[in-house]
Image (cartoon, rainbow, N blue to C red):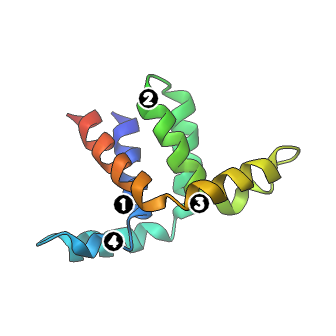
């Protein structure tokens, strides 16, 4: 259940620039996403920790991907592997909206 919640929170941050397109609720979701965007790195690190801790299926893999994108700013500080992870997160960042939509759908499905 925590993996599903983290997927939804991470997806909202990833989709912050696109949520206004949702009819009726888009304006409010965008405000929430912009607020959560201030905690982007913290949400990313917590997402990675939760995914490793609650390793169960493909939802955890998707949560790690979301966490890597959100925590891209601090990934280069990791010793030895930091520059490689930073390159991976930069490449994944190009697919931010697509990954955000998939994460939102997966998070809702995980909670159901």
Answer yes or no: do the residues labelled 4 and 3 have beta carbons within 8 Å? no
Q: Is residue 63 above or below residue 69?
A: above
Give the Cα separation between the discs numbered 2 and 4: 25 Å
User: Is 78 displayed left or right of 111 in the figure?
Assistant: right
Image quadrant where residue 29 sits: bottom left
Image quadrant where residue 70 sits: bottom right
Instruction: Answer with mark 2 or mark 3, whichever residue precedes in sequence.
Output: 3
The residue at which mark 3 appears reads as 41
Q: Secondary structure at mark 3?
A: helix
The residue at which mark 4 appears reads as 18
What crowding class fits label 1: few (fewer than 14 Cα within 10 Å), some (14-19), or many (20 or more)?
A: many
The residue at which mark 2 appears reads as 58
What crowding class fits label 3: few (fewer than 14 Cα within 10 Å), some (14-19), or many (20 or more)?
A: some
Instruction: Answer with mark 1 or mark 4, whichever residue precedes in sequence.
Output: 1
Instruction: Answer with mark 2 or mark 1, whichever residue precedes in sequence.
Output: 1
Q: Is residue 10 above or below residue 22?
A: above
Q: Secondary structure at mark 4?
A: loop
The residue at which mark 1 appears reads as 12
User: Is 44 displayed left or right of 15 in the figure?
Assistant: right
Instruction: Answer with mark 4 or mark 3, whichever residue precedes in sequence.
Output: 4
Q: Secondary structure at mark 2?
A: helix
Instruction: Tell me where residue 102 appears, x and y as whole percent.
Output: 35, 47
Q: Secondary structure at mark 1?
A: helix
Give the Cα separation between the discs numbered 4 and 3: 20 Å
Instruction: Tell me where residue 17 appears, x and y as whole percent.
Output: 38, 74
User: Which residue is found at the position 60% from the left and 50% from the top?
Assistant: 68
Where does the N terminus fall, quadrant-wise?
top left
Q: Is residue 64 above or below residue 72?
A: above
């Amino acid at each position: 259940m925590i993996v599903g919640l983290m997927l939804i929170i991470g997806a909202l941050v990833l989709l912050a620039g696109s949520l206004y397109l949702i009819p009726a609720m888009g304006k409010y979701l965008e405000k929430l996403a912009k607020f959560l965007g201030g905690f982007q790195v913290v949400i990313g690190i917590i997402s990675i920790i939760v995914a490793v801790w609650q390793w169960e299926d493909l939802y955890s893999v998707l949560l790690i991907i979301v966490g890597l994108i959100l925590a891209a700013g601090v990934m280069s500080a990791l010793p030895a592997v930091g520059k490689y992870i930073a390159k991976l997160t930069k490449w994944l960042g190009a697919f931010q909206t697509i990954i955000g939509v998939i994460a939102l759908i997966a998070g809702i499905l995980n909670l159901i």
